[in-house]
Amino acid sequence: METIPKIISAPAAAPATSNTARPVPPRPRQYDARLARWMVAPLVDTRVSPNHLTTLRLIVGLACAWAFAQGGYAMANLGAVLLVLSNFIDHTDGELARISGKTSRIGHLYDLASDALVTVLLFGGIGMGVAAVAPDQYPLPVPLSASALGWIAGIAVALIFFLRMRIEDRVGKAGTKQASVGGFETEDVLYLMPLVTLFDGTRGFLIAAAIGAPIFALLVIADYVRVMRRALPVEAGESAATAEAATAVEAVQPMAPAAFAADAEIERALDAIDFDAATREFKSQDAFIYLDKFLPKTVTEQLIAVVRSVTPNVNRNYLPGHKQGGSVSRHTLDELAPFVAELYRSPALMRFLERLAGEKLLPSPQDDPHAYALYYYTRPGDHIGWHYDTSYYKGRRYTLLLGVVDQSSCKLEYRLHTRNPGVAQVEGAVAYPPGALVFFDGDKLHHRITPLGENEERVSLTFEYVTDPRMGTWQRFISNMKDAIAYFGFRQVFRQILGRTKR
Ligand SMILES: [Fe+2]
């Protein structure tokens, strides 16, 4: 079971020049994941998908639970061998997804459901197997049947995994970091199951699991409560003042060296900007400005490395007649490329944007997948039709677009003053190459991106800032559904509920 994701990726210094080579995700640290990657490597360019491997894992896992449930020495040993096999196969689907780029929302949910089902049935099966073998001869030290102990252990383990997913979502991988020694982790103890069954220790294992798993679950519950209290995100319904306080707390946290350097470079780049002229232009264009050179080269280069490293996590979307392209949400970036989040909160950047907007800006709430995201146009025809970046927040929402990769003929076409009665509409078109900036009030700028041509590639970064992070329940629902369908997929948008990112 890879219920606790084992691959922790940092933004690798991936080559930024090739736009055709498939990026190689960082090598896993665990031996079983490394072996799994080596074994599935020949499958990358075949019709075998990660879902096929998940199905194989599910079948082996169910067979394992069935074997244990039969009871008896031989079947317990068969069950233990199938358990090792099932655990190992569970690494293969994720590895194939990572190295082949065959990621999918459905695949990930399928994998999660398989993990949960196999876990609960495994322990339930062990309990049933122990109960089936002369229960009167070997009374248990507790007034419960062996089957009940099995289900208790299974449900407790499933609860542990679920809570750890939630903790990870809130504070990142560090919050659930497993004890890892020499490439082995806590869950790898299940690889020792054949030794347990070989020495006829299934009954003792069941009792230990039924006692230990609920105790461990209580500890994880306490951890969960502590983390949730400590790191509450800005939620809908909270006052703008509370949100501001939360932002202030974030602002005084130490920045990572790379982000600190990026902030200093942005500060220096701002020296070349005539603030008054920029602010006038922003106002005269009904809250829209384009700067062809903004991000310092070193910052852009780091973003290009991020783009290459998170490419396996792109979620492709098609809305016939309106939109086609790929996206990586803030949730995935938080996990794989924290530099983006730090850049998003760069004090120098935010000061500049606030000066343009003429008002206080706040980061979008923590559950907004759009807060910062990468948009990938990699296939001919990728585009988005005419639209506004409608704000569902109670206040205004500003969009910042930064060019990262642009080997394309795409243009951002826009119409100014469309909602400005009495002012003549103005039309324009700009390309935004690496380092260029576009900043606008999403509810005012009517815009689109023209389709990508053959053999072209374009990746841009978007940051969204709000003036009031509150959002009504209905607006939140609409916003989430729109993000799930049009951008990031249900998995990424609703991951606060569903848990970890394996693929
Ligand atoms: Fe847009």
Image (cartoon, helix red, strand yellow):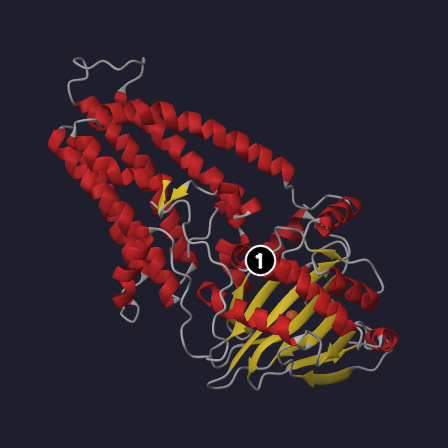
Q: Is residue 320 visible?
A: yes
Q: Could you classify mark 1 by the number of other residues whose Cα lies within 10 Å: few (under 14), some (14-19), or many (20 or more)?
A: some
User: Above or below — where is 339 with respect to 325?
Assistant: above
- Which quadrant does ligand 1 occupy? bottom right
Name which quarter of the figure residue 462 lies in: bottom right
Q: Residue at position x 65%, y 45% from top? A: 233
Q: Residue at position x 53%, y 72% from top? A: 376
Left/right of residue 336 with respect to residue 400 in the rendered view = left
On-image quarter of the N terminus? top left
User: Above or below — where is 238 with respect to 426?
Assistant: above
Name which quarter of the figure residue 385 lies in: bottom right
Name which quarter of the figure residue 278 lies in: bottom right
Nearer-the-camera pick, 423 or 289: 289
Looking at numbered disc 1 in the image, what kind of residue is underneath it?
Pro
Q: Is residue 444 visible?
A: no
- Residue 375 horizontal/vertical position (percent): 56, 70
